[in-house]
């Protein structure tokens, strides 16, 4: 752990441990994590942290919609609606970061 990023380092350690001790396939693991994010009313940054791994594991927008439909009876309509907005905000943040990185690369 570095002094500059103790929280990030801790999150990486936790994620690494969960991957090492998990028997789910990557796609199923990411769908499970998305369901958990919906259940806890996670903020956009939490979805953003999962976007890359979810896409890399083959999770599609249709899969996320199916998870939202599947958890709705358990977590309730307000959490599912909030999750939809937070997912869209996370995607917007991802686009802004990519555009900023492309702009910085172009300026070099």
Image (cartoon, rainbow, N blue to C red):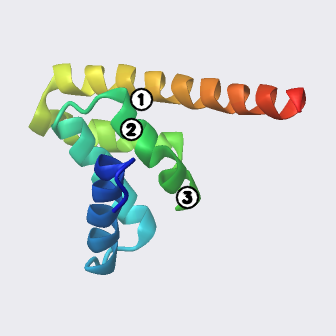
65, above or below 7, in the image: above
Q: Is residue 65 visible?
A: no
Compare residues 29 and 98 and report the one nearer the observer. Answer: 98
86, above or below 7, in the image: above
Q: Residues within 10 Å of mark 2 (few under 14, many from 20)?
A: many
Q: Position of residue 46 (x, y in %)?
A: 34, 38
Q: Is residue 74 visible?
A: yes
Label 1 and label 3: CA atoms lie apart by 17 Å
7, above or below 19, in the image: above
Label 2 and label 3: CA atoms lie apart by 16 Å
Compare residues 64 and 46 and report the one nearer the observer. Answer: 46
Q: Position of residue 42 (x, y in %)?
A: 25, 33
Disc 1 vs disc 3: Cβ atoms closer than 8 Å?
no
SS assignment at label 1: helix
SS assignment at label 2: helix
Q: Quadrant of residue 74?
A: top left
Disc 1 vs disc 2: Cβ atoms closer than 8 Å?
yes
Labels 2 and 3: the sequence-earlier one: 2
Label 1 and label 2: CA atoms lie apart by 6 Å
Instruction: Tell me the residue that label 1 is attached to.
Output: 87
Labels 1 and 2: the sequence-earlier one: 2
Instruction: Tell me the residue that label 2 is attached to.
Output: 47
Q: Quadrant of residue 9?
A: bottom left
Q: Residues within 10 Å of mark 1 (few under 14, many from 20)?
A: many
Q: Is residue 82 left or right of residue 58?
A: left
Q: Is residue 31 left or right of residue 75?
A: right
Q: Residue at x 39, y 47 (%)?
A: 4
């Amino acid at each position: 752990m570095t002094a500059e990023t103790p929280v990030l380092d801790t999150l990486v350690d936790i994620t690494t441990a969960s991957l090492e001790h998990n028997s789910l396939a990557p796609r199923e693991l990411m769908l499970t994590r998305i369901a958990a994010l919906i259940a806890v009313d996670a903020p956009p940054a939490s979805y953003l942290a999962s976007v890359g791994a979810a896409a890399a594991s083959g999770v599609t927008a249709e899969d996320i919609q199916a998870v939202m439909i599947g958890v709705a009876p358990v977590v309730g309509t307000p959490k599912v609606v909030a999750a939809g907005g937070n997912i869209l905000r996370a995607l917007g943040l991802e686009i802004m970061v990519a555009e900023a990185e492309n702009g910085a690369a172009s300026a070099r």
